Structures are given as structure tokens and as C-alpha cells.
């Protein structure tokens, strides 16, 4: 596909997303459409346009005990990331969901600065990341109850992150493998409690199907709908039967490892869901970017382009229609992020 064709094609997707929902606007009867918080303010649900649901601007893996804004120069990060977001905008993408959690390099001010400079909408998150053997959890995550942790996340959802006034659009948590540790299970319960007050969707870094299903059980017990759950990194689970199992219970299945060397595999994963009537529950993204704090110049920044330059053409070669591509890039992200029930 030429650049012009691709732009026109993606522009069409954006326009279609902005149109009022027709008789197939499933879920709206039950849950009224609500606004979605971006780092520059609220937008109406259904207006996100073409969206990358899982990317990173900056990460710092040093650990919760040492992570700090003093470890990087915000101007340098801004300058490094800026051209990549401009490229993304040129490719027709309007919204980027930034999945770096607190204690791992979340910087809402930096995100707002980048969004202002590029007109790419950016969404940030609340919640804690319990994967990587709890290295990125602050001490209070171990001592407080699920209710106390939820109170912290609800505070961020209602008042904004730190003193920025910037409100998160979703929760990002993370768990290690099943059986879930005590603290990981507590994070899932805290997420359910936060959902009950805020309705924010719960994106959880989860690399195995057995852990994902345990999270679904915990959410159900805590009274959260499973359509609020996004199984992040579902492609890391090699047995595709787990994807269908989680989808049949109502969860969103996110294949967010689209990269030059994994285009074909991601097409197969999405096709498997489509062939089983579950395209309406699939999310796709790169999990790219990653200015690495602590590495010279932020290390090797991975651009956000493969999905547009290679993955979409590969989907079309595999028989996906324009409407199905729109489902993946526009409708499903908008639906997942506004807490609507998947089409299933
Ligand atoms: Zn990620």
C-alpha cells in the first residue's frame, strides 16, 4: 500500500469511528457512553479514532526502591520521542495508550507535553505492576489492604496523578504466573474495587492463560464484569485455546507484540479469533517505544509503525476486509477503553 493510499484508508477509518453508532452499537443500552480521559482532557467515548492500545513512551526498570524523576532529563526524552509520535500521526493514528505504570517511569507531564506538541491523544493509567517478581511494587503494596490500594487508585482517577490534575483512562496492573501470589491477587481485587467506583478498564500484564483465568475468577468474585478486563500480552501464551477460553467469559484479548519479526504470527492469532467468532474482542498493538532510563540516549527506541506499514497489509492479504480492520484499530479499542461490552 502506498503512503497516500494508506493515509486515505486510515482517514476513512477515523471518520467511520466518529459516526453515531447504528443498530449494532451493542452495549450502549445497558451502559451509557462516557467520556475517556486523555492527558489533555476528556474526549467523548467513540471519538478516539485509530488507536494503538499498548505502547510505551518511557520505562525505567531500576525498581520501585530507586525509580525517580531525577534519573532522566525530561527535555532529552521529549526530543527523542517527538519524531516517533509525529510519524505515528502521519500514519493516521490518532490515539496512543501509554502503558507504563507508576514506579516504572510513568510521567504524566511528559505525556501531556508530547500530546500537546504532536496532537496525538495519549492515555495514561493508574494501578501497580506486580509482575517481574514484585520488583516494581512500592512497600505499601505489601502492607495495605486491597481496599486501601483501591482508595489510592480511585484518588488518582478522580483527582489526577500526583499534583498534575491529569486523570488516568484505565488501570494497568501486572501479575506473575499462576497460582497468583498473595500480593498479585490483592492487586486484582483492588482493581475490581476501583472499577466499582470508577468504571475504568483493567489492563493486566499476564503472560499465561492459567494466570489470566485466575484473574477472571477473582474479578468475578469481587463483582467486576469480565468485559472490563484486558488480557495484556495474550500472544505470550502459545496455546491458543486459552485465548478462546478467556474470550468466552467476556474478556478482551490483546495481542500486543506486533513487530517486524512477528507480523505473520500475529495475523495467525487474530485470524484464529476471527474464525471462532471472536474478532470483536481482539486488540492489537506493538508494545514498542521504550526510552530506557539509565541507558545512554535512552537506548534503542522502537518506532510505532509496523502495525500500519506491515501488519494491516498482511491482514488484508489474509482476507481481512476494511470493516474488520476498522474493528481492530478503531471500534474495539474505543469499546474496551470506554468500558463497553465486546461484540463477542
Ligand atoms: Zn508494555
Image (spheres, grey):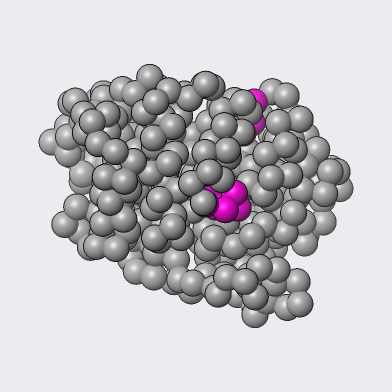
Q: Nearer the viewer, residue 151 or 236?
A: 151
Q: Nearer the viewer, residue 20 or 156?
A: 156
Query: Where does the image place residue 180, in percent across and percent down from the top left?
Result: 48, 25
Image vertical order of residue 322 relative to residue 22, above or below: above
Query: Where does the image place residue 73, in percent across and percent down from the top left?
Result: 18, 39
Query: Where does the image place residue 330, in percent across and percent down from the top left?
Result: 63, 60
In the picture, measured across the screen, residue 245 lies left or right of residue 7, that is: right
Image vertical order of residue 200 relative to residue 59, above or below: below
In the picture, measured across the screen, residue 172 lies left or right of residue 4, that is: left
Question: Looking at the image, can residue 54 be seen?
Answer: no
Total numbered labels: 0
The magenta stretch spans which residues? 224-237
In the picture, measured across the screen, residue 126 lies left or right of residue 73, that is: right
Q: Residue furthest left?
A: 70
Magenta highlight on residue 270 = no
| Residue at the spot 75% in from the left edge and 50% down from the top edge | 279
Q: Quadrant of residue 241?
A: top right
Magenta highlight on residue 236 = yes
| Residue at the spot 41% in from the left edge and 30% down from the top edge | 184
Q: Nearer the viewer, residue 320 or 63?
A: 63
In the picture, measured across the screen, residue 248 lies left or right of residue 60, that is: right
Amino acid at each position: 500500500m502506498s503512503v497516500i493510499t494508506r493515509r486515505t484508508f486510515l482517514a476513512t477509518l477515523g471518520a467511520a469511528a466518529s459516526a453515531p453508532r447504528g443498530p449494532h452499537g451493542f452495549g450502549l443500552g445497558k451502559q451509557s457512553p462516557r467520556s475517556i480521559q486523555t492527558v489533555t482532557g476528556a474526549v467523548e467515548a467513540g471519538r478516539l479514532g485509530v488507536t494503538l492500545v499498548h505502547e510505551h513512551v518511557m520505562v525505567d526498570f531500576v525498581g520501585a526502591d530507586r525509580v525517580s524523576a531525577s534519573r532522566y532529563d525530561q527535555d532529552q526524552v521529549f526530543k527523542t520521542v517527538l519524531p516517533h509520535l509525529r510519524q505515528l500521526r502521519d500514519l493516521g493514528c490518532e490515539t496512543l495508550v501509554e502503558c507504563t505504570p507508576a514506579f516504572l517511569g510513568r510521567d504524566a507531564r511528559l505525556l501531556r507535553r508530547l500530546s500537546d506538541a504532536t496532537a496525538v491523544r495519549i492515555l495514561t493509567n493508574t494501578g501497580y505492576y506486580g509482575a517481574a517478581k514484585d520488583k516494581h511494587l512500592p512497600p505499601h503494596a505489601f502492607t495495605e489492604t486491597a481496599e486501601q490500594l483501591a482508595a489510592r487508585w480511585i484518588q488518582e482517577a478522580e483527582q489526577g496523578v500526583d499534583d498534575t490534575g491529569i486523570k488516568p483512562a484505565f488501570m494497568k496492573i501486572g501479575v506473575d504466573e499462576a497460582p497468583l501470589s498473595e500480593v498479585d491477587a490483592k492487586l486484582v481485587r483492588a482493581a475490581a474495587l476501583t472499577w466499582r467506583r470508577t468504571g475504568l478498564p483493567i489492563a493486566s500484564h499476564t503472560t499465561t492463560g492459567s494466570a489470566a483465568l485466575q484473574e477472571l475468577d477473582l474479578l468475578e468474585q469481587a463483582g467486576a464484569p469480565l468485559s472490563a478486563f484486558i488480557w495484556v500480552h495474550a500472544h505470550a501464551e502459545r496455546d491458543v485455546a486459552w485465548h478462546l477460553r478467556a474470550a468466552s467469559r467476556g474478556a478482551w484479548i490483546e495481542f500486543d507484540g506486533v513487530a517486524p519479526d512477528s507480523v505473520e504470527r500475529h495475523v495467525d492469532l487474530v485470524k484464529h479469533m476471527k474464525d471462532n467468532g471472536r474478532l470483536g474482542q481482539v486488540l492489537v498493538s506493538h508494545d514498542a517505544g521504550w526510552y530506557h532510563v539509565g541507558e545512554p540516549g535512552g537506548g534503542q527506541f522502537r518506532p510505532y509503525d509496523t502495525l500500519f506499514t506491515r501488519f494491516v497489509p498482511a491482514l488484508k492479504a489474509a482476507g481481512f476486509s476494511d470493516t474488520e480492520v476498522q474493528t481492530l484499530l478503531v471500534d474495539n479499542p474505543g469499546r474496551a477503553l470506554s468500558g463497553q461490552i465486546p461484540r463477542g
